[in-house]
Amino acid sequence: MAKHIKSPSTIEAAGNKPKIIEEFIGRVNSGSSELSIARMQSPSGWVEPGQTPEFDEYTVVLKGLLKVETKNNSYEVGEGEVIIISSGEWVRYSSPGPEGAEYIAVCLPAFSPDTVNRDE
């Protein structure tokens, strides 16, 4: 059955500065636990706590630069680039560039505060 979603839900974000999360599909906006799709807009200098999520995360950078740190590597993901983080892998996201970052995050299964496992 088709489901028309007319607008996203804004969700509170973790990190040192305000970041906008607009969930189009997921637990909050569509009641979907299988998958979540959200647009993120993070300001310059934003950093979130590290996490070890229980979901795969596929991230497409639309604008700016997203820094992605894992236990073994650090990546600078620019406009038009993608990074995939596997479930169970420690990761920390930040937007160090002067314009911040805008990106789409797809989580499978859907993002949940109970399964993101943020560092204390």
Image: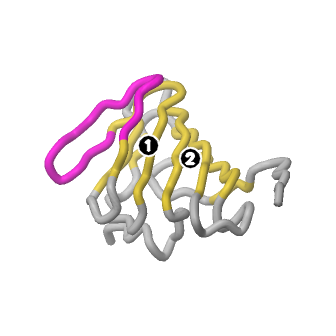
Count of all numbered marks drawn on residues in the image? 2
- Answer whether residue 79 is magenta in the image: yes
**Residue depicted at 18% across the width and 42% down the height:** 73
Query: In the figure, 71 relative to 41: above or below?
Result: below
Q: Answer above or below: position of 103 versus 25.
A: above
Q: Residues within 10 Å of mark 2 (few under 14, many from 20)?
A: many
Could you tell me if residue 68 is visible in this image? yes
Instruction: Give the magenta range.
Output: 68-83
In-image side of 29 versus 94 (left or right): right
Q: Main secondary structure of the magenta part?
A: strand
The residue that disc 1 covers is: 46
Badge 1 amino acid: Trp
What amino acid is labelled 2 in the image?
Answer: Lys
Q: Residue 19 bears which disc, if any?
A: 2
Mark 2: secondary structure: loop
Q: Are marks 1 and 2 in contact (CB under 8 Å)?
A: yes
The x, y position of residue 3, in whole percent, is: 82, 56
The structure residue drawn at horizontal position 36% and vertical position 58%, both measured from the top left corner, is 49
Nearer-N-terminus badge (1/2): 2
Residue 55 drawn at (x, y percent): 42, 63
Image point 85% across, 51% down: which residue?
Answer: 4
Give me the residue at 47% from left, 24% from top.
80
Structural distance between the alpha carbons of marks 1 and 2? 8 Å
26, 52: nearer the viewer:
26
Q: Is residue 109 above or below residue 114?
A: above
Looking at the picture, tell me which residue is in the foreground, 20 or 37: 37
In the displayed orientation, state which residue is furthest to the left. 72
